[in-house]
């Protein structure tokens, strides 16, 4: 005999059975018929992480701290117009910014006056107009470091200028060190004695820019995300005049040392002819310095009408003596670079 209660339970069991058959089996995780499965499109654009900066990413702001002998962005010179090439400056700063972001151990190629031994002679060398051995890039053996492709190699690839910035890719405790160029492209092996290792804690946020075409000099410092232009002045760079005077080489160089007075000699002799005040050395015997003082005079000369005209030094960058002191005090070693553009 069926009671009302047994009939009720019978209907309930049928209802639950039907409902259970309509549910997705959670164990198989299969989709319902009316659900759409969207697969990730592997061809869709994905923003690049740590995308290298270009010149367009660099922000400049005028914030003049040294205001003597200042120039405008464009200014007249004889029958033409000269200018500060800010687009080129930003491109070079972007290289430094990317190197800062990349991290790693910084270093500098170093062989001032061949103090770490004259580099070997490269195959297929040429003698330049100064009678010196040079590679196919025009870099002289004198005061340069030898760059090889593999450790222990006896065949040189090229020469590396004194003052060029590098990143150390291997330990600097071994005889041969693998380096990556910041001032030049590619990776090379360099004998340890030609490297100053500066560690991984420094950042280059101060830049001195020298323009050999427009004969001017500027200083910039990074604060926050912006590079502030601190000075814009006339300068005079090196002239190609064998056998003694040479052009100021273009590139990115580290500020390596400072001299309150940089004594210079009479061409072709060892006789001291005078001094240049507030000198900051960046490559070989090239300094950013003030107006040269020729003996018997001993007083610092503030300015010369030749500044900002045509190249005439031996490789150095001359500028107003008070501006060279500004650079001397501000551009610290291991914090500052000299960028030479054309």
Image (cartoon, grey):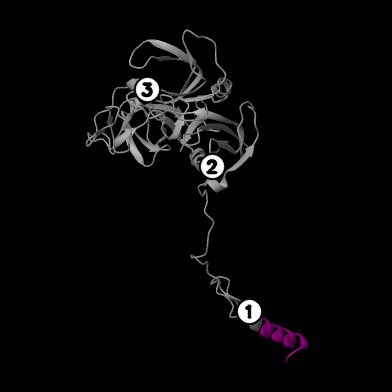
Give the label on residue 318, or none: none
| Residue where numbered disc 3 is placed | 112
Region in magenta: 1-16
In the rendered image, residue 337, in percent from the top left (x then y), is placed at: 49, 31
The magenta stretch spans residue 4: yes
State if disc 3 and disc 1 touch (CB < 8 Å).
no
State the residue in front, 176 or 114: 114
User: Is residue 218 at least partly visible in the picture?
Assistant: yes
Relative to the observer, which residue lies in front, 188 or 16? 188
Mark 1 neighbour class, 10 Å CA radius: few under 14, some 14 to 19, many 20 or more: few
Q: CA distance from mark 1 to mark 3?
A: 86 Å
Q: Between 185 and 338, which is closer to the camera in this rendering?
A: 338
Tag 3–tag 2 contact (CB < 8 Å): no
Q: Nearer the viewer, mark 1 or mark 3?
A: 3
* Quarter where residue 323 is shown: top right
Residue 312, percent from left and from top: 44, 26
Mark 3 packing: few (<14 Cα in 10 Å), some, or many (20+)? many
Q: Quadrant of residue 117?
A: top left
Q: CA distance from mark 1 to mark 2?
A: 68 Å
For mark 2, give the secondary structure: helix
Residue 179: x and y in percent read 37, 36
Tell me if label 1 and label 2 are in contact, CB under 8 Å: no
Residue indicated by mark 2: 90
Q: Is residue 94 magenta?
A: no
Residue topped by disc 1:
20
- Residue shown at the point (54%, 42%) measured from the top left: 90
Q: Is residue 152 left or right of residue 337?
A: left
Magenta stretch: dominant SS?
helix
Q: Residue furthest front?
A: 79
Which SS class for mark 3?
helix
Residue for point 48% across, 39% down: 99
């Amino acid at each position: 005999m069926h009671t009302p209660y047994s009939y009720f339970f019978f209907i309930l069991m049928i209802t639950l059975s039907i409902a259970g058959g309509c549910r997705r089996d959670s164990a198989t995780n299969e989709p319902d018929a009316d659900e759409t499965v969207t697969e990730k499109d592997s061809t869709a654009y994905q923003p690049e992480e740590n995308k290298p900066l270009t010149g367009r990413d660099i922000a400049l702001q005028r914030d003049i701290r040294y205001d003597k002998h200042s120039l405008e962005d464009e200014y007249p010179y004889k029958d033409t117009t000269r200018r500060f090439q800010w687009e080129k400056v930003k491109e070079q700063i972007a290289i430094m910014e990317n190197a800062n972001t990349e991290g790693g151990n910084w270093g500098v190629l170093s062989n001032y006056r061949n103090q770490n031994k004259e580099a070997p002679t490269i195959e297929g060398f040429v003698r330049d107009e100064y009678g010196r051995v040079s590679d196919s890039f025009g870099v002289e053996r004198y005061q340069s470091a030898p760059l090889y492709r593999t450790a222990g190699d006896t065949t040189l690839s090229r020469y590396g200028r004194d003052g060029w910035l590098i990143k150390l890719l291997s330990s600097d405790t071994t005889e041969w060190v693998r380096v990556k160029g910041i001032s030049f492209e590619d990776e090379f092996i360099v004998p340890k004695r030609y490297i100053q290792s500066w560690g991984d804690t420094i950042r280059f946020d101060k830049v001195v820019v020298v323009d050999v075409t427009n004969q001017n000099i500027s200083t910039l410092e990074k604060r926050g995300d912006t590079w502030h232009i601190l000075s814009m002045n006339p300068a005079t760079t090196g002239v190609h005049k064998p056998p003694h005077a040479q052009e100021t080489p273009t590139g990115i160089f580290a500020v390596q040392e400072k001299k309150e007075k940089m004594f210079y000699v009479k061409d072709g002799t060892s006789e001291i002819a005078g001094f240049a005040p507030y000198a900051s050395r960046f490559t070989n015997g090239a300094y950013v310095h003030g107006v040269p003082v020729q003996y018997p005079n001993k007083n610092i000369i503030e300015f010369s009408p030749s500044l900002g005209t045509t190249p005439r030094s031996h490789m150095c960058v001359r500028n107003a003596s008070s501006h060279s002191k500004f650079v001397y005090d501000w551009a610290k070693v291991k914090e500052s670079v000299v960028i030479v553009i054309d």
